[in-house]
Image (cartoon, helix red, strand yellow):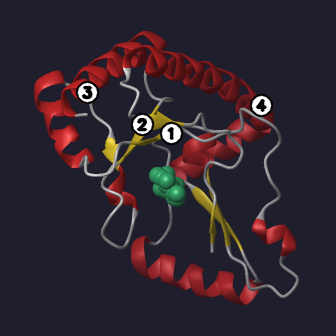
Amino acid sequence: MEDNPYGELRFDGPCPPSIKSFDTTGVVISLGSFSKIFCPGMRVAWMIAAPEILSKFADMKQNDILCSSTLHQAQIVAYMEMFDLDLHVEKICQVYRKRLSVMMEAIGQFFPKGAVVNPPAGGLFAWVELPEGINARDVFKVAVEEHKVAFVPGGAFFAEPGHENYMRLNFSGVSEDRLKEGIRRLGQVLAQSL
Ligand SMILES: Cc1ncc(COP(=O)(O)O)c(C=O)c1O
């Protein structure tokens, strides 16, 4: 199962080939979503798979919610008939690339040295590694309650326990000014914790 809603959002070099493109026997199921490349919150997605797999999933989807919002599907079709979706993706990549660079610059300015962040080559998030023993869920509590800034604690992304010293930061959803202010506040919280 190739779950790839962010693959087209690239800031540094071309998107790597999809796993599906290496599939010679029809075993790979590839997933994409318009919610990350067209409009956040518009949860219409697609699946590329062998016909026998697709028909099983179509039955499951009908049993579950019948179908994704027909209004949203029609809006996406109308958009693609009238405009160039690839051009839209290029535009949002420019906006997100700038926001990422604002966030990385603010991190350099406000985060203590013990917090390690490598700029991502694409997507909507940066991954922060804190020193071992620091629990990002504790940092989260202070950040939200006392500084009104949020992130997702990294442990939430793993099936098994651990990885509690990681944070996932979103850089796409807010303006550059708010991003900078959010990172400044998070920097204050981290400076107290590290
Ligand atoms: C890895 C991953 N797959 C799938 C989804 C779901 O996408 P959708 O907005 O189509 O529900 C998300 C995020 O929301 C995601 O992060």
**Residue at figure coordinates x 45%, y 22% from the top left:** 107
The answer to whether 174 is drawn above or below residue 65 in the figure is: above
Report the Cα–Cα distance between label 1 and label 3: 15 Å
Which secondary structure, mark 2? strand
User: Which residue has dot 4 on it?
Assistant: 83
Can the viewer see residue 26? yes
Report the Cα–Cα distance between label 2 and label 3: 11 Å
Q: Mark 2 and mark 1 in contact (Cβ < 8 Å)?
A: yes
Q: Earlier in the sequence, mark 4 or mark 2?
A: 4
- Where's residue 12, x and y in %? 75, 34
**Residue at figure coordinates x 35%, y 73% from the top left:** 160
Name the amino acid type tagged 1. Phe
Foreground label between 4 and 2: 2
Q: Earlier in the sequence, mark 4 or mark 3?
A: 4
Q: Earlier in the sequence, mark 2 or mark 3?
A: 3
Can the viewer see residue 175? no
- Where's residue 6, x and y in %? 62, 48
Report the Cα–Cα distance between label 4 and label 3: 36 Å
User: Which residue has dot 1 on it?
Assistant: 125
The answer to whether 98 is drawn above or below residue 140 in the figure is: above
User: Which residue has dot 3 on it?
Assistant: 149
Q: Earlier in the sequence, mark 4 or mark 1?
A: 4
